[in-house]
Image: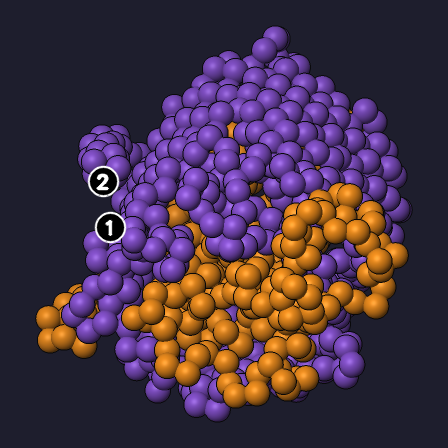
Chain colours: A purple, B orange
Amino acid sequence: MRAIAVLSVLWALPALAQTWTSSQEEENRPSDETPGRSHYRVDSNSTFVAYMIRSPLAPVSLEERRFVEWLSVDHIYDVGERNAEGRTRWRLHTRGQLRIDQEFGRDCTRVDDTCYLGTSDDAPRTYQVLTRRTRLDVPGLSLTAEGPNATSVGVGRQTIFDGAGFVRVDGVRIASTPNRFVNIEIFGGLQVVGTSVAGSSGYSSQGTLRLPLPQTLSPRDSLIVAPESAVEVYGGHLRVGDARYLRAELLFRETRDGSGLVARRVGGGLLSRPLPMLTLRARVLHDPALRRIVDALGEAALTLKATSLRVRVFHHEPTFDLGSIWAYFDIIPVQQVELVATQTLGPVQLHGALRGRRAISDKTERDVGGELGAQVRLGAWRLAASGWFWAGDLTPVAFARADVRRAIRDRGEVGIRASLWRFTDPFRAQLYASSFSATLYGGYRLTEYAQVRGEFEYGYNRIVSSRLRGLVSLRVRLWR
Amino acid sequence: MKWSHLKWTHGLLVAFLLIAIGASLQEEPTHADVAETLRGTTVYPPQELAVKMNHELPAHASLRCERCHVGATDSTLASDRLLPTEASCAPCHDAQTQRPGGECSFCHLGEPRASRVPTARLHFSHETHAQTGVPCLSCHQVQRTELATRQHLPTMQSCFRCHGGDGVGRQVPGASSECSTCHLQQGGVLRTEFGEARMLPPAWLFNMEHDRDFLVRHRWVAADNGEMCTECHHENECADCHDGRTRPPSVHPNDFLTVHGPMARRDDTRCASCHTVQRFCAECHARLGLSPMAAPIAAPAGGFHPPGWIENPSGHAMEARRSMNTCTSCHAERDCVVCHGASGVGGGVSPHGPSFAPRCESLRSSNPRACQTCHGGAVPQCP
């Protein structure tokens, strides 16, 4: 896998050199995609990250270096004759994408100069078992046909997002807007998790670890992890109405695996824009299995020329895979009310917020918070400062940040960002501190197709002493 | 820290400082004045107008627009240069334009030179609008204007008087409301990145402005108007960010690693939006000796939680009920079963709420795994 990572970088560099010689000035000839019947696009995005940390509770430190490369090929084919606007009745869109996530270097738990690996062959369940050196994930192939009335039929790996959250599926998705008052979507397939073809575990439901279990695993150890299982997910939504007056939505989603039901959600939403400057929104998500409202929102937003004001109330409780024990614990929801405002005064934009939070149990926890910030653009300079705080029954915490950025010849930027945190942990008296951090960052568009970006961060607090973090990324994007 | 590390880090620090200083000494970019910053430059790049002009003068106001802006009604591209030329001014201003002896300063600012008007980053056909009968002054309101600048070019909101839809603006028959009708595309989505800035949606457009609050709001906006998101964003951008591996700096500000514990208790921002707690969080916590899954060499003496954590009602009981995600970031199911498993399996302390009993049978039939974990053996019966 290291060879693949190296080869990817070697591929990107010649591509970068080629595009460097063929770049064009944009000012008088903006880059515009030629509306050919068939066209394709290749994207490459490479990122290298290295960082080191120290632990406040043990004389250990951690080093990690990670290389992530993302490759994608899209092909679009327009079917049929073009209308006066240059569009065809149907379009076929094929996509293939692959991501390589390679960790290398001293990837271990380190005590001074001694490096301890995170896993042990002799006792695999004694140590943390989650270290992986290479992840080859997020490969996907999908084919989507887009037609009239916003009808689309997609087969393959795709992303669904609705009021129940977003989910990646290997399956089928059908959507249509037969008239401007009705929109419908249904989907179904296998959720992209660790059991998928080189799938990512990043989108699994919260709950028990799912890993392939060896034959020698004892029943006691099986309480740590559950066997991997294919996860099926299906659902859809129906929207009726005109958002200018009132639009209602019903949605449904269900997820199942080898153990049984993972999650079931039904929900609804209302959206109304009775006035151009006023938006009213309400959403609710209910778990019929546990008979609990797991998410709810009510929001009113007023947007004037230079002012916006939002009031929202929301209710949330964490949810877990119904195959894990935590789904059946007596969870209490958290409710929060916010008032958020932004104001533009010439080149200056101000924002502020007031927040209140509560969790009702045998006793009621309450917190209040506030936020204030400003940013101004003066020519090539952009200055920003902000701060927020929370105080009350939960851990008090405060944060302030300043950011100074300068554009470079309309092709890049360089800046410095500094922040100060103040926090206290009520359960560990020794964990109170002010944490300072400063970051130098910059980015530059080498050519029309290539961008380079770097960040260098230094942080200090009395708990973990100094911490350094550096990041360099090169992004090359190609298309024809 | 080792001396070699200090040398490496100091060297990087010096290098970045030199780059920053060098960049700051670069010549001023072409868009500098404050007035220009009041209007975005992503669609209409900054101009350098080198002439004087007064549209309000009766002699100018009485003329038809195309008298001076030759070719405007036949123009089909945004890149067409439609500013008046000397030839269009000469019939009335022959005294000023004659050579030699003309009065160049009558129209020109400073040394005579052409105005620099970069092409608007749009698709636009004046011909289509002219044939449809849209008056020039409907979009270019220069009746009471001296020199027309970028400020007098049509705004997106003014375009939505005809090209609106879905509850925003008004859609006139024949006027497309597709974003790609006007905006440049790049690889199937709108082109949003330009040299000096990114093109972002305005506040009046479905409440989609990408301000600081959008980090919290975007899930509701995406749920209500997800198809609008896909006009500018590829689906993989959602995955890239929510996979917890590549994210904008605004999500976790500087040194979030130190303060993420108190923030996780608040679940603000929601950890589970991007992180699978039993993998991502537990992996690091185990490495650092904070989790029962940690290697013995890394585990701290005395454990992680303070004395009285179990017995204190404000301790683990309240924390678990309010922030269960923080518990699962370190603990596996077996840790909870020790106490909360049924008698014979664990300590017999029931974790269920008061309303659990009526739902027991339906939950047991839906997925018995969790029941078996705590109650052990074969699928248990509900009380």
Where does residue B359 sit, x and y in percent of width and height? Answer: 84, 54
Report the residue at 70% width, 71% height from top: B349
Where does residue B344 sit, x and y in percent of width and height? Answer: 65, 64
Q: Amino acid at mark 2?
A: Arg
Q: Amino acid at mark 1?
A: Phe
Observer-nearest of B39 and B328: B328
Report the residue at 29% width, 51% height from top: A121
Q: Residue furthest top?
A: A80
On the rendered image, what quadrant is the N terminus of chain B found in?
Answer: bottom left
- Local secondary structure at mark 1: strand
Q: Quadrant of residue B215?
A: bottom right
- Tell me whether marks 2 and 1 sit on the same chain: yes
- Local secondary structure at mark 2: helix
Observer-nearest of A480 and A45: A45
Report the residue at 44% width, 47% height from top: A217
Contact (Cβ within 8 Å) of mark 2 with mark 1: yes
Where does residue B287 sit, x and y in percent of width and height? Answer: 36, 64
- Dot 2 corresponds to which residue? A2
Residue B254 in view of the camera: no
- Dot 1 corresponds to which residue? A104
